[in-house]
Amino acid sequence: MLPIKLNGVPVTQPFLPPLEEFVAYLQQIWANKHITNNGPFHQQLEAALADYLGVKYVCLFSNGTLALITALQALGITGEAITSPYSFVATSHALIWNGIKPVFADIDKDTLLLDPAKIEAAITEHTTAIVPVHCYGYPCKVEAIQKIADKYKLKVIYDAAHAFGVQYKSSSVLTYGDLSILSFHATKVFNTFEGGAIICHNAEMKLRIDQLKNFGTVDEVTVVAAGINGKMSEVNAAMGLLQLQYMDEILTQRKAIDAQYRSLLSAVKHIDCLQPPEHTSAWNYSYFPILVRPGYPISRDALYTKMREQNIFPRRYFYPLISEFPMYRNLASSVPENLPVATEITQQILCLPIYPGLNIDHIRQVADIIQSQ
Ligand SMILES: *Cc1c(COP(=O)(O)O)cnc(C)c1O
């Protein structure tokens, strides 16, 4: 075995259920020899997640990026899609992989989510879709976005990679838009090692997506689309079923860490702790983002470096902006003048360590570094 050494405090760590419980699932997989292709655990996890999340249909995928690529395919999106530069690169990469041009619109300065007014201003005759991101699990302005989509006949595909279990006005935020995608990557609140899903609202769409993620096949002799292989294996599905049993514990621990940071940092001048926007009726405490404002004694990057020197590894989610990467920076919508809020925020953001098992001494150490500058 390779030596594994975990040094210091990472920004996140996956929740791992007791190994013997996972082994019991593996024994079942070994016994029935159904290791992938819509096996029993895959079917159980789709049903269990639909129930847990409060959505109609779940299509499991091998990761969130393939789920997003497939969601865009399923809706036949072409031309241009309006999206957020303030996200993980996978959001825009999924557009490129479908030959769709990303058009970046600016974010709101309080929620760091796509600003509906900026979305509307970015629409052209080529626009066919809006791809907003529920960044940090904060629900987008879903009603305003739907209004714009209806007015211009656009599809809405939410990158809900961060929004597992999030509710807006007491129902799942995943029920908004045409489709939403989730990520179950190891770094996310709910993980299946690697994994993801598309959330959809009717049986026909579920069938279409299930075909697309399995090479476009219907049966042994029938292929109806140029599909991809996006299937989740039984081992991943088993991890999901087991992980789901621990969600209450995971969320309780995350909530407590969130509260500790908030109380320790509330008096620190020029440090703002972000909050989910109004009408977020359930949240997942997936990240703990702070903004290091201009009056703070040192820069965000200096604070980031200070923490690293003490073996604490916060992350600058999201820096750089997607629009700053080489494959995007020449787009007209990537110019900083088009994205003044995102351009400012990306220099101030710092996500602090938060994960089940993070101990109070480390939380205090993080807060001490921030307080003592
Ligand atoms: C994690 C993430 C993805 C990609 O999900 P994978 O499961 O890692 O492919 C997409 N978008 C956002 C915003 C993410 O954070």
Image (cartoon, rainbow, N blue to C red):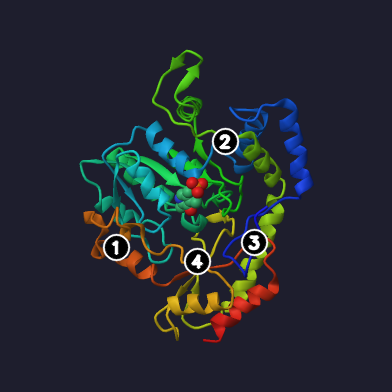
Residue drawn at (38%, 68%), measured in percent from left and top? Answer: 345
**Spatial separation of the CA atoms under disc 1 and disc 3:** 32 Å
The tag earlier along the polypeptide, 1 or 3, is: 3
User: Which of the two discs, 2 and 1, labels the residue nearer the N terminus?
Assistant: 2
Mark 1 = which residue?
Answer: 339
> Alpha carbon of mark 3 to alpha carbon of mark 2: how far?
27 Å
Q: Is the CB of mark 3 within 8 Å of ligand 1?
A: no
As helix, strand or loop, the secondary structure at mark 1 comes to loop
Mark 4 is surrounded, within 10 Å at the Cα level, by few (under 14), some (14 to 19) or many (20 or more) other residues, namely some
Q: Amino acid at mark 3?
A: Arg
Label 2, residues with CA under 10 Å away: few <14, some 14-19, many ≥20? many
Residue beneath disc 4: 315
Q: Is residue 246 left or right of residue 88?
A: right
Q: Amino acid at mark 4?
A: Arg
**Residue under the image location 40 percent in, 64 percent down:** 319
Front one among 31 and 183:
31
The mark lying in front, picked from 3 and 2, is 2
User: Which residue is identified by label 3?
Assistant: 254
Label 4 or label 2, whichever comes before in sequence order? 2
Place of residue 263 in the rendered image (x, y in percent of width and height, measured from the top left): 62, 76
Residue 99 image-quadrant placement: top left
To which residue does mark 2 refer?
A: 232
| Amino acid on which disc 2 is placed | Met
Question: For residue 193, which numbered disc appears in the image?
Answer: none
The alpha-carbon separation of the residues under discs 4 and 2 comes to 29 Å
User: Distance of mark 2 from mark 1, alpha carbons?
Assistant: 37 Å
Q: Secondary structure at mark 2?
A: loop
Q: Residue at x 60, y 47 (%)?
A: 193
Out of 248 and 360, give the one closest to the viewer.
Answer: 360
The answer to whether residue 160 is seen in the rendering is: no
